[in-house]
């Protein structure tokens, strides 16, 4: 079973809601708040990684709200990006949020796992660009795109 089908079968996986620009904008605000927090936490790499990840995650989740798809499982939201938004994102952007999610888990839940300076620098350097990319996509998504993506999700 692929990840999308798995997420559709889970209670807190994917569910359809009405597309909602107000919720999309609220999640962009949360993403911007997380970006500011990450910038303020420069002397605390663990929390900077967490805030950076949430900035990216909230901006991605804003896109799901615009499309009308609810997901309470982070790995499902990222799988949605990989499978159903692949025409809108580059592979590097998808890999970035996947790596940021793993880094966030590693620093938040494990005291013996370290994040490489290279990965930390990449997350730190790309977080604002990722949020900006999601904001651009919110403005570019047409009703036709939304219906096509929703239809593709129903097809799993």
Image (cartoon, rainbow, N blue to C red):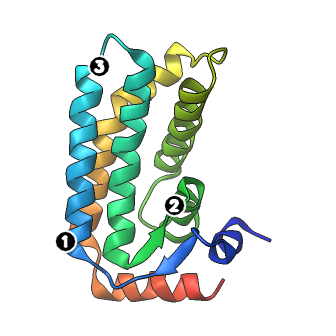
The answer to which image quadrant residue 152 occupies is: bottom right
On the image, the x and y values in percent for residue 32 come to: 21, 44
Residue indicated by mark 3: 41
On the image, the x and y values in percent for residue 1 come to: 80, 71
Horizontal side of residue 130 vs 3, given as left or right: left
Residue indicated by mark 2: 77
- In the image, residue 69 sits, relative to residue 92, either above or below, namely below
Count of marks overlaid on the render: 3
C-beta proximity under 8 Å, tags 1 and 3: no
Counting residues from the N terminus, which is met first, the one under dot 1 or under dot 2? 1
Horizontal side of residue 77 vs 54, given as left or right: right
Horizontal side of residue 100 vs 56, given as left or right: right
SS state under label 1: helix
Q: Residue at the location (65% across, 18% down)? A: 113
Q: Residue at the location (45% across, 72% down)? A: 70
C-beta proximity under 8 Å, tags 1 and 2: no
Q: Residue at the location (43% across, 27% down)? A: 49
Q: Residue at the location (66% across, 83% down)? A: 156
Residue indicated by mark 1: 22
| Residue at the front extreme of this rendering | 11
Looking at the image, which is closer to me, 110 or 43? 110
Packing grade of label 1 (10 A; few <14, some 14-19, many >=20) is few
Counting residues from the N terminus, which is met first, the one under dot 1 or under dot 3? 1
Looking at the image, which is closer to me, 33 or 121? 33
Counting residues from the N terminus, which is met first, the one under dot 2 or under dot 3? 3
Packing grade of label 2 (10 A; few <14, some 14-19, many >=20) is many
SS state under label 3: loop
Looking at the image, which is closer to me, 137 or 42? 42
SS state under label 2: helix
Packing grade of label 3 (10 A; few <14, some 14-19, many >=20) is some
| Residue at the top extreme of this rendering | 43
- In the image, residue 34 sits, relative to residue 17, either above or below, namely above
């Amino acid at each position: 079973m692929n990840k999308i089908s798995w997420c559709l079968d889970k209670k807190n996986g994917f569910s359809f809601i009405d597309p909602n620009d107000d919720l999309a904008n609220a999640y962009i605000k949360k993403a911007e708040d997380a970006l500011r927090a990450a910038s303020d936490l420069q002397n605390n790499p663990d929390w900077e990684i967490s805030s950076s990840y949430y900035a990216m995650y909230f901006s991605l989740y804003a896109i799901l709200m615009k499309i009308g798809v609810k997901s309470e499982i982070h790995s499902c939201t990222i799988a949605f990006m990989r499978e159903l938004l692949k025409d809108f994102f580059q592979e590097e952007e998808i890999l970035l949020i996947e790596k940021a999610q793993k880094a966030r888990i590693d620093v938040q839940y494990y005291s013996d796992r370290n994040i490489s300076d290279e990965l930390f620098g990449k997350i730190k350097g790309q977080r604002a660009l990722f949020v900006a990319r999601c904001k651009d996509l919110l403005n570019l998504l047409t009703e036709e795109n939304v219906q096509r993506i929703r239809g593709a999700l129903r097809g799993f």
